[in-house]
Amino acid sequence: MEYYITQLNEKVQREHVTFPNRFGIRIAADLYLLKNLNQSQKHPAIIIGPPYGGVKEQGSCVWANELALRGFVVLAFDQPFMGESGGEPRRITSPEMFTETFSACLDYLGLLSFVDREKIGAIGICGSAGFALSAAQCDIRIKAVATASMYDISYVSRLGQTKEQLEASKKVLSYKRWEDAEKGYPEYIPAFPEAPLKQVPEGMPEPTAEWFRFYAIPRGHHPNARGGFTTASNLSFMNFRLLDYLDEISPRPILFIVGDRAHSRSFSEIAYKKALSPKELLIVRDAEHIDLYDRTDRIPWDKVEKFFKENLK
């Protein structure tokens, strides 16, 4: 049964599509466009990556619905091993795979007769911001990038750990692989309940409570997004740095969008300092991390539209 966290605007049509990534895994995506879009002409397109662990029916559909209304062809996708995309075992995470999906989306969009393949941009929400930037470092077909509530998952994997703590983490995860091999399937421990809660449990610490304010209650709950990934897959991020070549995106522009109250604000600020011009850091007033997933009164739509229309020329 289909379930999206927001209603599709009556002026917008949504089509389910699939296409392969370079590893041959089928990527499931939703293509959004205006119902009266003149398909005899070529139009600019935007790829939207979901929050880390999220699916296309959550924050991505909110962004895609609005940007389609503003004249863009929009593609919102599920990462491999997630949602309706292919790949086994389920809920594996991989920095290379998740970055590659943006390029696979470019492959698909560039074959559509009504998309101008020289006018394709990308938006990454939360963890997908790091993957979108990583893809843009090498795939020059991405002409402009915007991030919302950015997370760099490769940085998080080592955040705050001493050398001794890192060694201990590696030991646990490495030996977990033997446990998984013996069982024949990797361990996965969901973070959120199968059915939505009525409210966030009282006394839950931040930022866990913030994740529950979206993923665990009707606001953003989806059965395909239970939170977290297979335990041992965290090793791949400890051995991978997503943004080592961030400066090479220039002269293509980057727009960093982050809430003033976002616990993740530092990721956008660090990346902004590292990136070369043209770049812009937009701080949204009275917004926490998850507000840029779905709060249509907080997401700066006019700014996003202007950024892509000016830079996808």
Image (spheres, grey):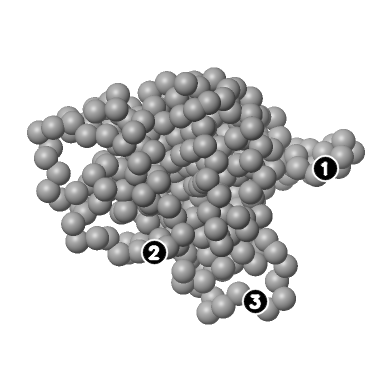
Q: Looking at this view, is 181 or 199 the one in front?
A: 199
Q: Residue at x 36, y 37 (%)?
A: 308
Q: Amino acid at mark 1?
A: Gln
Q: Residue at x 27, y 60 (%)?
A: 8
Q: Which residue is mark 2?
A: 5
Give the side of residue 44 with respect to residue 97, left or right: left
Q: Amino acid at mark 2?
A: Ile
Separation of marks 1 and 2 at Cα, in angstroms = 36 Å
Give the side of residue 239 with respect to residue 116, left or right: right
Q: Which residue is mark 1?
A: 161
Give the side of residue 23 with respect to residue 167, left or right: left
Give the side of residue 307 with respect to residue 91, left or right: left
Kindly check if marks 3 and 1 are in contact, taking CB atoms under 8 A apart as contact.
no
Residue 25, placed above or below residue 184: above
Can residue 88 be seen by looking at this rendering?
A: no
Q: Looking at this view, is 76 or 70 the one in front?
A: 70
Look at the numbered disc 1 and give the secondary structure of its residue: loop
Crowd band around label 1 with a 10 angstrom C-alpha radius: few (<14), some (14–19), many (20+)? few
Can residue 145 be seen by looking at this rendering?
A: yes
Image coordinates of residue 288 in percent, x first then y, are 58, 59
Image coordinates of residue 48 in percent, x first then y, are 40, 43
Q: Amino acid at mark 3?
A: Pro
Image coordinates of residue 271 in percent, x first then y, are 62, 35
Q: Residue at x 49, y 55 (%)?
A: 292
Q: Looking at this view, is 121 or 235 the one in front?
A: 121
Q: Quadrant of the N terminus?
A: bottom left
Q: Which mark is residue 201?
A: 3
